[in-house]
Image (cartoon, rainbow, N blue to C red):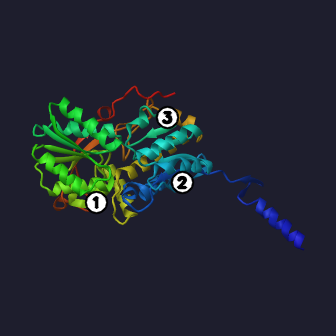
Amino acid sequence: MTSKWMACLLAGTALAGVAHVGGAFAADPEPVRITVISDLNDDLYDARSGRGGVDATRMAVADFGGSVLGRPIVVDALNDHNKGAEAPALARQAYDAGADILMDVQNSPIATEVSKVATERKKLAITTIAASPALTRAACSKYFYHYSFNLIAITTATANYLMTQPQNKRWAMIGEDTGFGKAGVGLMSPIVTAHGGEVVKSIVIPQQNTEADFANALGDISGANPDVVAVFDDAAKGDAGITFLNKAKLKATITTALLYLSDVDRVKDGYAGVVAAVPWYWNLDPAARAWADRYAAAHNGLRPDAAQAADYSATLQWLNAVKTAGTTDADAVIHVLDGHKFDDMFAHNAEFRASDHMVVHDLYVAKVKSSAQLAEPHGWFDIVSTVPAATAFPATTECKMP
């Protein structure tokens, strides 16, 4: 009796995951796997993308129908803890587990490392929140797409807009002593001078800066009477610095390189009056608003940030390419994506540019409202200008795409 019971058990185990079709047994199809790599730690990086980006990716899968090529679509998530050093192992772990594409891939150091692994494995990855222009220039890869924005596009759009106003001739630059801070100052300064403006002060503050460092910077720039103060400082330090300068009641417009709705939600009037370019805004137009309403309904009224909308958009674009290609094979999907033009709730006049794998689209210049000006919760941005895709993302020759 025992041997018969064991034989039945083993037979049942062998048939687990196997469907009976037309009198024969057929294995369940392997799922198509999308792995979101992001910071899931309930902090400012999580708010910018993180778990909301995972949810947005799953929204896209659900809207697509949940399957492609007769295979179910599974979305996995891995926590990168906002640490570039963890990214290579996470990327390899995801690919080893069957991931067909890595999504979100926030911050430039993480995106750079993931791009290397994607190239090594000949698998696809898309970043929706990294700023480094090198990702589509010297460090470009056939297997990596850069969605949403980069530092050059954002700083150029912002400076060009501000310099169209005759009162914005005298500029002060405050940059943290990092590659990001120096790059921001280095990119924006020549645009100011090319428009006939003048950089009257350029100040470097320590990487681990405090309010005292901004107090010293304020003392240095006050006597120069700048019309515009540009701040290139990242994360919570940047929030604190911009808030400090705002409270000082400078008679100057404050601008910055990276403006996130979630950061403004957190510090509120600390960002009032700040002007900067953004890749997307939830109340930009009816299509953006309709999608944002759906997202908010599932997130207690919280409005999505740009990277979360980009995750949704990029996921749908990739799934449609897989459907067209008839396979998840990266080379076949790249063949479909390269040169593909589209217009959706995130990107207008958009194209997967084949020459460097930058996903180009219109950008927008936003001015942050004060809390007294809010017509509804999270409605912080007033879009004051649209920058066409061709202007926002000029083509370069630095990328040597195979």
Determine if residue 325 is in view.
Answer: no
For marks 1 and 2 on the same chain, the one whose residue lies earlier in the sequence? 2
Asked if labels 3 and 2 touch by Cβ distance under 8 angstroms, the answer is no
Q: Which one is closest to the eye, mark 1 or mark 2?
A: 1
x and y percent of residue 5 in the render? 85, 71
- As drawn, the label of residue 66 is 2
**In the image, is residue 23 above or below residue 7?**
above
Q: Is residue 85 left or right of residue 92?
A: left
Picture coordinates of residue 106, whole percent (x, y): 43, 49
What's the residue type where badge 3 is placed?
Ser
Q: Which residue is mark 3?
A: 141
Q: Which mark is residue 274?
A: none
Residue type, mark 1 in image: Asp
Q: Amino acid at mark 2?
A: Gly
Q: Which mark is residue 265?
A: 1
Q: Mark 2 vs mark 3: which is more N-terminal?
A: 2
